[in-house]
Image (spheres, rainbow, N blue to C red):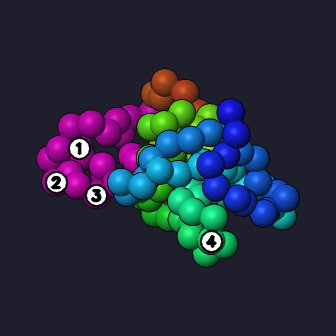
């Protein structure tokens, strides 16, 4: 499978074709100098015609990252943990006090070591 649009970043890896915001796009993942990968949706040959978002850089997952996930973006374990924490924090913020208390466990026992809602 070949990209539809020209993309000149040598750090990017082409993932495939898809769509974003009702446009045909070529999906890329860019691994530059930072630890986090950036998702890129290129929608024309013009250099500035793309959307991008770094995985885990926002409080809640942005639409671009969610669109890439829905279309098959494969995540590493750190990215999975980050996105799950983002989704859980977003859900936590939508709960009232009683709902929050109903889903949270405040005792000594735990299923595992993860502390997803710890926002320290």
Q: Is residue 103 magenta?
A: yes
Q: Is residue 88 visible?
A: yes
Residue at 42%, 55% (x, y): give it. 23
Q: How many marks?
A: 4
Mark-to-mark CA distance, 3 and 4: 40 Å
Question: Which is more foreground, mark 2 or mark 1?
Answer: 2
The answer to which of marks 3 and 4 sits earlier in the sequence is 4
Apparent side of residue 85 relative to residue 40 in the rendered image (left or right): left
Q: Tag 1, which secondary structure? A: helix
The residue that label 4 is drawn on is 46
The residue that label 1 is drawn on is 101
Q: Residues within 10 Å of mark 3 (few under 14, many from 20)?
A: few
The residue that label 2 is drawn on is 96
Q: Tag 2, which secondary structure? A: loop
Apparent side of residue 2 relative to residue 22 in the rendered image (left or right): right
The residue that label 3 is drawn on is 93
Q: Residues within 10 Å of mark 4 (few under 14, many from 20)?
A: few
Question: Which is more foreground, mark 1 or mark 4?
Answer: 4
The location of residue 50, given as percent across then percent down, is 57, 66
The outermost residue toward the bottom is 48
Q: Tag 3, which secondary structure? A: helix
The answer to which of marks 2 and 4 sits earlier in the sequence is 4
User: Is the magenta region chiefly helix, strand or loop?
Assistant: helix
Which residues fall within the magenta stretch? 85-108
Mark-to-mark CA distance, 3 and 2: 8 Å
Q: Is residue 31 magenta?
A: no
Mark-to-mark CA distance, 2 and 1: 9 Å
The answer to which of marks 2 and 1 sits earlier in the sequence is 2
Residue at 56%, 41% (x, y): give it. 17
């Amino acid at each position: 499978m070949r990209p539809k649009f020209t993309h000149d970043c040598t750090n990017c890896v082409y993932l495939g074709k898809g769509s974003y915001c009702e446009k045909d796009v070529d999906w890329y993942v860019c691994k530059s100098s930072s630890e986090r990968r950036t998702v890129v949706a290129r929608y024309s040959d013009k250099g500035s015609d793309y959307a991008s978002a770094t995985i885990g850089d926002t409080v809640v997952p942005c639409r671009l990252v969610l669109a890439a996930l829905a279309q098959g973006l494969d995540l590493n374990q750190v990215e999975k943990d980050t996105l799950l924490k983002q989704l859980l924090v977003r859900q936590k913020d939508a709960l009232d006090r009683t709902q929050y208390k109903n889903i949270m466990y405040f005792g000594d026992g735990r299923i595992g070591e993860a502390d997803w809602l710890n926002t320290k």
